[in-house]
Amino acid sequence: MSELKRQMEDFHKIKSFGQVDEKVAEADFFLKKFCTTQNLYEARFYFSAFATASRSITFTMQYVMKEVKGFGDWYIKWQGKLKSSELAKKFLDIRNHIQKRGVNPIDGGSFANAHYAYHSRSLKVDNIAVYCKKYLTIIIECVWQCYVDFGRYVDPHMYYTKENYENMGLSVEDAEKELWGDRGWTVTPFLSEEHRWAIMRASTPGCQIKNLFLKYLGKYIPEPKSVELPESCDEKVKHFLKEKGYHYNDGFWLPANVEDVNSLIKDLRINRTSDFNSMA
C-alpha cells in the first residue's frame, strides 16, 4: 500500500473521533451537575455517571485510533503518565467499586460559600469535586495532545487543507472528489482556492470540544488560518460578475448568453445551478 493511500485510509478509519469529543463533553456535563446539585442522592448519581464517563474517554480514543500508524507507541507513553498518577489510579479504583460492587463513595456534604461540597469518609476527601476536576484535566490533556500530534487524522479541519493535500501530492479538486464525489464542486467566478478549502472545512464538523480545552487547559488546538468568505451582498463580487457579463435573474447570476435558470438547465444539461447563486 502506498504512503498516500495509507494516509487517506487512516483518516477515514477514524472519522468517528467525534465519539471521543462526545465522551469528554459527557464527563464535563456530569461533573457540572455534581458540583451544582444540592441533593445528596442526585450528587451520588452524578458522581457515579462522571466516574464512568471520564474513564471511558481513553477507552474510546484507543478504539477509534487503534489502526492509525504511530498511535500505539504514542499511547503507551501516555499510559505511563496515567499509571504514575495517584489521582488516576484512585479514580480507576473508584470506578471499579461503583461498577463491580455498587459502592458509591459519596456519603455526605456541607454547605459553604454559597455552594455544596460533597465528601467521602472512605476516600478521606472533604471536597471531592476538586479531585474530579483535577482528574478530568489530566484526561482532557491527553485528548488535546492527540489533536496536536494527529491533527490531520482526527480533525477534518486539519485534513482538508491545501498543505495536507499538497503533501500527499493531491489538489483541491481531489479533495472535492473525496468529500463530495465530484471535482469542481466549489468552482465559482468569485471564490479563490483559499475560499474553496474553507468551504470544504465548513461542511465538516471539526473538533467539538475547543471550549473544554480552553476551560480545563487554557489551550487551543492547531487550526488552519481563518478565511473570511465573501458575503452574498458584497458589492465587489457584484461588480466582478457584471464585468464578466453576468446578469441577475430570479435570484441567480447567469451568463450573458443565458436568459433564465430554466434555459440554463435545459441547454447545458446541468443539475447544479449553485455555481451561480444569488448575490443580492
Image (spheres, rainbow, N blue to C red):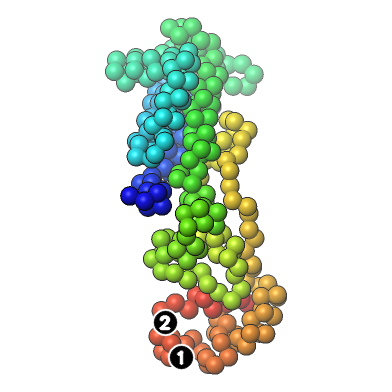
Rendered position, 100 above or below 166: above
Residue at label 2?
Answer: 270
Q: Is residue 161 visible?
A: no
Which residue type does callout 2 highlight? Ile
Which residue is depicted at the point 57% across and 82% down?
Answer: 253
Task: State the SS at label 1.
Answer: helix
* 55 and 51: which is toward the camera: 55
Residues at discs 1 and 2 in contact (Cβ within 8 Å): no
Nearer to us of marks 1 and 2 is 2
Label 2 residue SS: loop
Q: Which residue is mark 1?
A: 263
Indicate the amino acid at tag 1.
Answer: Ser
Image coordinates for residue 73, horizontal then vertical, percent: 41, 29
Q: Quadrant of the C terminus?
A: bottom right
Residue at left offset 34%, top offset 17%:
96
208 sits left or right of 189 in the view? left
Q: Position of residue 97 (x, y in %)?
A: 34, 15
Q: Is residue 89 above or below residue 31?
A: above
Camera-side residue of 256 and 234 = 256
View extreme (left): residue: 100
Residue name at image x 63 percent, y 54 percent = 226
Specify the quadrant of the image occupied by residue 65. Answer: top left
Measured along the vertical axis of the image, is residue 125 above or below residue 135? above
Can residue 280 be seen in this snapshot? yes
Few, some or many residues within 10 Å of mark 1 (<14, 14–19, 20+): few
* 25 and 167: which is toward the camera: 167
Q: CA distance from mark 1 to mark 2?
A: 10 Å
Count neighbours of disc 2 (C-alpha within 10 A) and say few if under 14, some if 14 to 19, many if 20 or more.
Answer: few
